[in-house]
Amino acid sequence: MIIFIKKKLSYIAIIFFIVISIQNLSEFNDFDMINIENDIDNSSLANESGDLSIQDELLNKDYIKLQKYELTRKNSETVDQLLETNESLNVANYLDLQSATDYFVDEKNMNLSLVPVNETMLFSGIPDPQSRPIPEKQAYFKATTITVQNKKSLKGGLAKFLDKAEVNFVYDRVKNHLDYKVKENIKFFSDSNDKILEINTFAKDLEQMNLRRNFNDDFVFFFVKAPTDTKVVRKRLKVKNSLSKTLKSARIPDSIVNEYLHQLSYTIDFQRDVKNGDTIELLYEANFTKNDAIVGKPLLLYGLVHLNYHKIELFRYKLENGKVDFFDANGKSIKKYLMRTPVKGARLSSKFGVRKHPILGFNKMHRGVDFAAKRGTPIMAAGDGRITYAGRNGSFGRFIEIKHLNNFKTRYAHLYKYAKGIKKGRNVKQGDIIGYVGTSGRSTGPHLHYEVKHRNRTVNPMKLKSESTLNINDEDMPNFYANVSLTRERFLATKLQESDTAGLSE
């Protein structure tokens, strides 16, 4: 009996919990949703006349209610739409083309080994734009130009216009870019209160490094192409005393003088072939600043020397392989197999042959020629070859011997010192610096003793006739002749400029 009563109580408890659960579920659901079908039936019965519009409207409302409680999977597009419609992030799209970073990026010396080729990164992690905005140029009241020749004068010049903090800041940025060889290489622009608004500096490689204040009153650095004019210059000179001194006294760029003397050294004996009164004419191209100062590397286009018995012309020409060299009017290279004069502009002080030795005091065969020059004057290799001896050699002092093709050897004695890297077994090219003029060994003064041997037989370097090292191909000759004609026309059309040693007659 007791067991039967316990079973009955258990059934009652289970039924009670089921009823309570059903009630809770009913409260949780929307009763309107449960009774949708009844409402639809009632509305259809109430509108038997066929008012379909009201019925459709009721159906749409009920469907929306069902859809509200329907379990669906939300995708990213739905989330984005909700954010766009319901949330305001207040993000401003800001673009200011007139601002620039104050951090100076040295793009020329930047190490990009770990950075992608087409992208550099700033410290903030933002890609560096291809072109940085430059502050607007402000109206200035006064412009002042100065010339600085070294870093010390640069700092002193900046101190006259800027405060101490700005001097150090500008100096660190400018010192390695400024071209100190150019006159009037810094220009300051200031307002009526003498406050510097902009600084223009003439940098290297025909560029101009400018510094301009931005809206934060800080300097922003940027490079622009330097304002230069390319001009062709024609010079006519008459030799006085020596060819080298005549050229250097005529205000011709040093690079043009050295190039011209180097080319002539293959063909001319400067001591015997060139006389006072001989005429020299040059045509060269250079970039000039507004104050007519030459910047960059000028190019020698044409050279002409009128000697007593003949004339020598030099034409600049670019070969098909891109190499640039100088040729005569027949297309033969000015460069010979061996140079007659391996020292630029040196004076021939002793000839080849029997002579009275200046130290020993008796006649002796002089198996070379001596070129007198200042101590430290560079000595060039007379031709391509390999060094077979480099060291001291008795009365020759510091000595170098080079073996060339076709059984030729050249020897250089009484050197002051050797060029860097010169040693036995090294290959050298024609024109390479191998040493410097000195007075080592048995010598009365600084000079170069120069010998040429062919098949172990000593020959006179001044009478050596060697072939040109490079000739123009027959297929390229029409282009070369056209270049010769154009160069001569350009030479005649260019106005002749006078100099201290120039002749006035055409």
Image: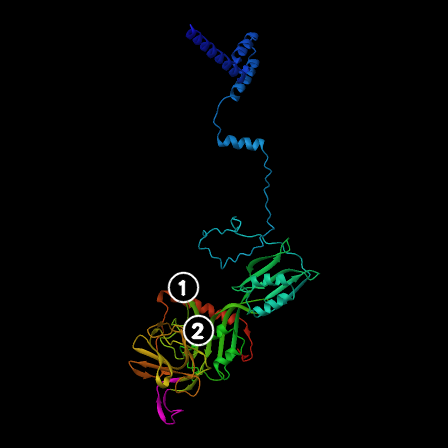
> Along the horizontal axis of the image, is 308 left or right of 193?
left
Which numbered disc, 1 or 2, marks the residue closer to the eye?
A: 1
**What is the residue that sits farthest to the bottom in this orientation?**
362
The N terminus - image quarter: top left
- Residue 490 is labelled as none
Residue 183 appears in the rendering: no
**What's under tag 2, amino acid-wise?**
Leu
Residue 56 belongs to magenta span = no
**What's under tag 1, amino acid-wise?**
Gly
Find residue 94 and report its horizontal and vertical position in percent: 59, 44
Residue 355 belongs to magenta span = yes
| Residue identified by numbered label 2 | 314
Q: Earlier in the sequence, mark 1 or mark 2?
A: 2
| Residue identified by numbered label 1 | 322
In this rendering, the answer to whether 329 lies above or below 219 is: below
Pointers 1 and 2 in contact (C-beta within 8 Å): no
Quadrant housing residue 104:
bottom right
Find residue 30 and report its horizontal and vertical position in percent: 54, 17
Q: Under tag 1, what secondary structure?
A: loop
Quadrant housing residue 438:
bottom left
